[in-house]
Image (tube, rainbow, N blue to C red):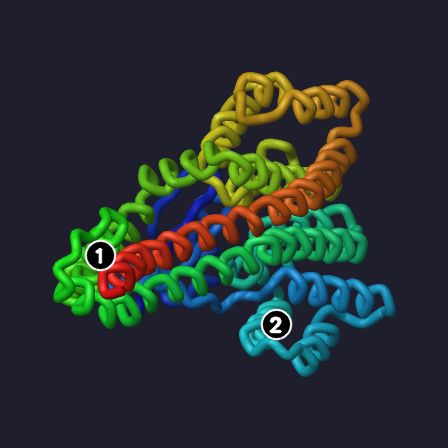
Amino acid sequence: MNSTFIYQARDPSGKRVRGTIESDSIHQAVDALRHRGYLVIEIKAKRPGLGLPGMNFRSGASGNELALFCRQLATMSRAGLELVTALEIIKEQHPNPYLRQAVSLLREDLVGGRQLSEALRGQPRIFPAVLVHMVAAGETGGILDDVLEWMAHHFEKEQNLREKVKGALTYPAVIALVAVAAIVFLVAFVLPTFSNLFISSGLSLPWPTRLLLSSSQFITKKWYWLVGGALLILPLGSLYLKTDKGWYHKDRVLLALPRVGPILLRVGLARICRALGTLLTGGVPLLTALGVVKNTAGNRVVTQALGEVERGVEKGSGLSALFASHPIFPKMMVQMVAVGEKTGSLSGMLLQIADYYEGEIDYVLAGFSSLLEPALVLVVSGIVGFIVISIMLPLIELVTMVG
């Protein structure tokens, strides 16, 4: 039974093309595209249109797992083991079941006469395009062991960057969730015990108390409006964000946010500079490297800018001049790329830029966390204080009246 596969590739003229192809397996689909003269960048099975929006169950490998895979394979290859034997050992030892299955398929492909890069290309959900192109370059240049070591370092850097960002945002997110839960509990369950007392007393309630009582009554008596609104807005919002336009607008808004935007931009620039520098170090042509790298930034605004840079390079323009034409790329980055082009050390300069931005991210994240945590405390304290004052004002007036 044929399956439908979605692919991105370059045709014989170097133009990027997208489309679908019917085939019995992903390997046959890749072979069919190769026979057409296409260089496959990405290919994946087309999934049925079922399931809830936003549901995405990951079945790949983390950066650390990919780094371990590359380093093990490089070490055993240097020790004189054949790749087939090395893959068999990795398959038996690796704790990730998805990666074990992927390694088993790699071994079968190698036994069937495929090169490692071809086998990796057949599993894009596990092995990213940057690894495929680097391995292909290593096979061509006879430096596969060195390339695998470089990729291990690359994936470790990627994972470290991801963990730093996640760690900086986790604690404030937990505080915010706990605060929201506590406020909802106070308004929905604690405040109603005072509402009957206030209403029956006949007091003229101050506006903070009236506002709080109205909010409490809405949450307790018309909660279905909140639930219904959430069930309507969240799926529609998720569907919109899945479109190119929605994703682009979301990323543009994120980059415009104070404090948050600069962090996200630095993360994206660090990722693309490291990936591009690594690919160029491995001998991958600049145009091909840009096609691979532009989807690694994690931000559609940066991706769109890189797409324009890619088209400019295809027409013969210099990389630094193209970067300079887009305000999203900082002047420091443009100047360092220009120096790399003039001195013939573009790949090394890009890796230095990645190191610089990763160091900046550490500094900025530390400052962001130190500002965000007290800001959250002040906001939560203000809301809780408002609730307490709203309850205490009529209580004080009631006690005074009774006395």
Amino acid found under the numbered disc labelled 1: Ser
Task: Name the residue located 54 percent from the left edge and 74 percent from the top edge.
Answer: 98
> Can the viewer see residue 320 in this picture?
yes
The image quarter in which residue 304 lies: top left
- Mark 1 and mark 2 lie on one chain; the one further toward the N terminus is 2
Query: In this view of the protein, which residue sits in the foreground, 358 or 373?
Result: 373
Amino acid found under the numbered disc labelled 2: Val
Q: Which residue is mark 2?
A: 103
Q: Where is residue 217? Give x, y as percent.
A: 17, 62
> Can the viewer see residue 135 in this picture?
no
Q: Is residue 126 left or right of residue 57?
A: right
Query: In this view of the protein, which residue sits in the foreground, 397 or 223?
Result: 397
Q: Residues within 10 Å of mark 2 (few under 14, many from 20)?
A: many
Q: Where is residue 312? Give x, y as percent.
A: 53, 21
Task: Name the residue located 56 percent from the left edge and 59 percent from the top edge.
Answer: 171
Q: Is residue 208 left or right of residue 264?
A: left
Res 215 label: 1
